[in-house]
Image (tube, coloured by chain):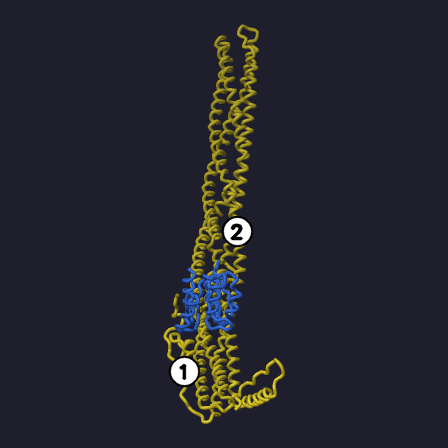
């Protein structure tokens, strides 16, 4: 009997002999007839269905794996972006912003102290300048009245001229002294007036500065204190959120690892289906075109049982994967929402905190700038004080210098008067008047020097405060830089919010896609059901139909896995014609079996 | 610089599962569908090979022998990751030069512990 095997190919070398051509013709005929057996058609249809099933499920799980890989990449990117956003709030820039605010606190307190000290200094300046003016006004009046003394001296000098008591040019000296004193006093008064005028204009700016500082600085200080407190709270929240998110993402990654483990189970299922296909092909080949035998029915039933077992395990596994993916999707959604809220992105998708801090910094910067501008204006005005003071001092010294001259003339007049006797009394009057004037000059000059010393100390105090101008300008630069950082951070946060939103959507899309693909469990079950019906139909074609007990199905569970080795053992038993045996459940999953050589 | 691991398996989903676990841990991964394809990847810098046993064209045992004798990576660790658990197959892998043996399916943390140990 010519076996119903696939016809062999005609050798390429040379033309076939007549015998070879006949054999080939008969083989084709028998093979063709055998393939037309209904049960064989049924088996072939099942084989095609199963091969297609393997291809479909492989593609499905590859897609799931791809989705999970994309998810992992997106979640890492999300974590990185949130860390970056957290750094905006709690990193170096934030610390520098806090440092700038602390500098503002110091600046404000310094200004408040300076304001008090400047007030004292300006009060001293005003009082001293007023005092000098007042004293030399009195001296000026006295100098005016000295004209009478000069006239008396001229009369007496004329009277005594040519006599033995001639006093020479006494009258000229007295007149000259009087004129000198008057001129010097006028100079002092003019300088004192200029000084007073400068102080008055300065006091106007000082008053403005004082009003600004009294109103604005305490409020500024309170605002900065509040800002620092808010900033610190926000930073702590951001750091906590970032830490929690890291932990959550790690937890999700671990759970994804569990899903990846479950997906491997498909490899066993794939192998099972391949073995069934191989076993069914062997049944067809062994039948050699004859009707399905009893042994063939048994083998087909075993394959049906294998497929049933595979289907149950596969569907259970895919359902578990779907549940785990659903759980992860919910957690990812919660994480994204919580992160958004804690990082302040829930307000118009932008970090309201960074916006608010930016506005606060702008206000702080403006107030500090205004305050410094006024202060610098005051300092610029006071920079001329020293020159005025020196000029005033020079004039006062000139008045002081005339005292000696006055004293000498007074003594000469007194001596001349004593030589003349009773008729020289007018000269005594001149001498006395000059002495009085000299005393007055000395007194006023000495007092003015004391006032000028006070003025000098006050000016020195004001100049010393100006030394800090460079560091205050540095504060402005620092605040400006921090404001730029906050603007940049605010813009970055808006960008990050968009990225985070997109990544969150990507995560959810990846998970949903994975869940969609994990629905291949239903496709698997449908295919196996279809094959089972086909097997039943094939079984009914057999003569006789036997009902045999198929091996018990194995239920896959996390603790007991249907390993590939068990599957291979059954398959080899079936192929070798041995009776199928119950599958032993193996404790624990694979991966526990690790050996290092 | 992350270390690079060559994973060889005729199952796409299995290669994906291995790659997923390794990449999540920060390793770079190169994939090959069987031993023949894996040989073409050996010119790249590779720090470890993870291979299945039963593959078409060139199986895991042959691949291990090739790596140990005719590749620039003669001394890198090789993990046989397979569904087989027969002692004879294990001995054959050991004789060919495998560093360790692990049965599928695996938990990612288990695989990473083995990889971490052999790469240390």
In the image, residue A4 above or below residue A321: below
User: Residue at left 61%, top 84%?
Assistant: A16
Assign a secondary structure to mark 2.
helix
Q: Chain of mark 2?
A: A
Q: Chain of mark 1?
A: A
**Chain A colour?**
yellow
Assign a secondary structure to mark 1.
loop
1 vs 2, front mark: 1
Q: Looking at the image, which is closer to me, A466 or A329?
A: A329
In the image, residue A460 above or below residue B120: above
Percent coordinates x, y for residue A496 in the rendering? 52, 60
Q: Looking at the image, which is closer to me, A595 or A116?
A: A595
Task: Report the disc number at residue A553.
Answer: 1
Image quadrant assignment for residue A113: top left
Q: Are marks 1 and 2 in contact (CB under 8 Å)?
A: no
Q: Residue furthest top?
A: A164
Image quadrant assignment for residue A595: bottom left
Q: Residues within 10 Å of mark 1 (few under 14, many from 20)?
A: some
Q: Is residue A136 left or right of residue A255?
A: right
Percent coordinates x, y for residue A488 in the rendering? 54, 54
């Amino acid at each position: 009997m010519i076996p119903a095997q696939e016809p062999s190919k005609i050798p390429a070398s040379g033309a076939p002999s007549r015998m070879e051509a006949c054999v080939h013709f008969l083989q084709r005929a028998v093979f063709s007839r055998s393939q037309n057996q209904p049960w064989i058609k049924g088996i072939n249809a099942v084989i095609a269905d199963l091969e297609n099933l393997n291809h479909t499920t492989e593609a499905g799980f590859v897609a799931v794996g791809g989705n999970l890989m994309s998810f992992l990449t997106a979640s890492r990117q999300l974590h990185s972006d949130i860390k970056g956003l957290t750094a905006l709030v709690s990193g170096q820039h934030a610390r520098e912003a806090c440092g700038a605010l602390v500098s503002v606190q110091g600046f404000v307190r310094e200004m408040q102290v300076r304001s008090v000290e400047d007030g004292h200094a300006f009060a001293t300046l005003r009082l001293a300048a007023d005092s000098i003016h007042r004293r030399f006004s009195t001296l000026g009046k006295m100098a005016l009245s000295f004209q009478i003394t000069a006239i008396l001296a001229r009369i007496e000098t004329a009277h005594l001229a040519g006599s033995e008591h001639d006093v020479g040019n006494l009258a000229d000296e007295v007149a000259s002294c009087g004129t000198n004193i008057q001129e010097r006093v006028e100079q002092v008064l003019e300088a004192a007036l200029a000084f007073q005028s400068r102080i008055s204009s300065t006091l106007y700016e000082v008053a403005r500065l004082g009003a600004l500082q009294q109103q604005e600085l305490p409020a500024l200080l309170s605002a900065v204190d509040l800002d620092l407190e808010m900033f610190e709270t926000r930073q702590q929240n951001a750091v906590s959120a970032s830490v929690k998110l890291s932990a959550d993402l790690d937890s999700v990654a671990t759970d994804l690892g569990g899903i990846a483990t479950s997906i491997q189970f498909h490899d066993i299922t794939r192998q099972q289906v391949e073995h069934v296909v191989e076993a069914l092909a062997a049944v067809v080949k062994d039948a050699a075109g004859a009707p399905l035998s009893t042994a063939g029915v048994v083998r087909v039933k075993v394959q049906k049982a294998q497929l049933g077992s595979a289907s149950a395990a596969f569907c259970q596994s895919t359902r578990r994967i779907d549940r785990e993916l659903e759980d992860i999707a919910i957690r990812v959604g919660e994480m994204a929402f919580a992160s958004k809220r804690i990082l302040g992105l829930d307000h118009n998708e932008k970090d309201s905190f960074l916006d608010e801090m930016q506005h606060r910094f702008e206000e702080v910067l403006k107030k500090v700038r205004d305050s410094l501008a006024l202060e610098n204006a005051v300092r610029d005005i006071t920079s001329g004080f020293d020159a005025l003071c020196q000029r005033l001092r020079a004039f006062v010294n000139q008045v002081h210098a005339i005292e000696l001259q006055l004293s000498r003339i007074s003594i000469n007049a007194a001596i001349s008067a004593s030589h003349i006797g009773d008729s020289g009394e007018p000269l005594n009057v001149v001498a006395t008047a000059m002495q009085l004037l000299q005393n007055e000059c000395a007194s006023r000059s000495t007092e003015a020097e004391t006032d000028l010393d006070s003025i000098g100390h006050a000016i020195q105090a004001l100049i010393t405060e100006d030394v800090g101008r460079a560091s205050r300008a540095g504060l402005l630069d620092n605040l400006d830089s921090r404001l730029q950082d906050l603007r940049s951070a605010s813009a970055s946060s808006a960008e990050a919010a968009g990225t985070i939103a997109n990544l969150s959507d990507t995560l959810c899309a990846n998970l949903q896609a994975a869940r969609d693909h994990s629905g291949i469990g239903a496709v698997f079950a449908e295919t196996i059901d279809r094959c089972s019906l086909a097997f039943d139909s094939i079984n009914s074609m057999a003569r006789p139909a036997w009902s045999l007990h198929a091996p018990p199905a194995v239920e896959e569970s996390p603790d007991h896995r249907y390993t590939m080795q068990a599957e291979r053992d059954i398959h080899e038993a079936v192929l070798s014609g041995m009776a199928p045996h119950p599958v032993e459940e193996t404790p624990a999953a694979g991966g526990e079996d690790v050996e290092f050589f | 610089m992350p270390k690079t691991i060559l994973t060889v398996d005729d199952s796409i989903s299995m290669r994906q599962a291995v790659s997923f676990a390794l990449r999540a841990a920060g390793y770079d991964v190169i994939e090959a569908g069987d031993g023949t394809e894996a040989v073409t990847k050996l010119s790249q810098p590779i720090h470890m090979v993870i291979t299945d046993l039963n593959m078409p064209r060139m199986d895991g045992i042959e691949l291990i022998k090739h790596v140990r004798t005719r590749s620039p990576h003669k001394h890198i660790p090789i993990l046989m990751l397979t569904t087989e658990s027969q002692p004879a197959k294990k001995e054959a892998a050991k004789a060919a030069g495998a560093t360790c043996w692990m049965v599928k399916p695996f938990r990612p943390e288990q695989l990473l512990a083995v990889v971490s140990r052999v790469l240390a």
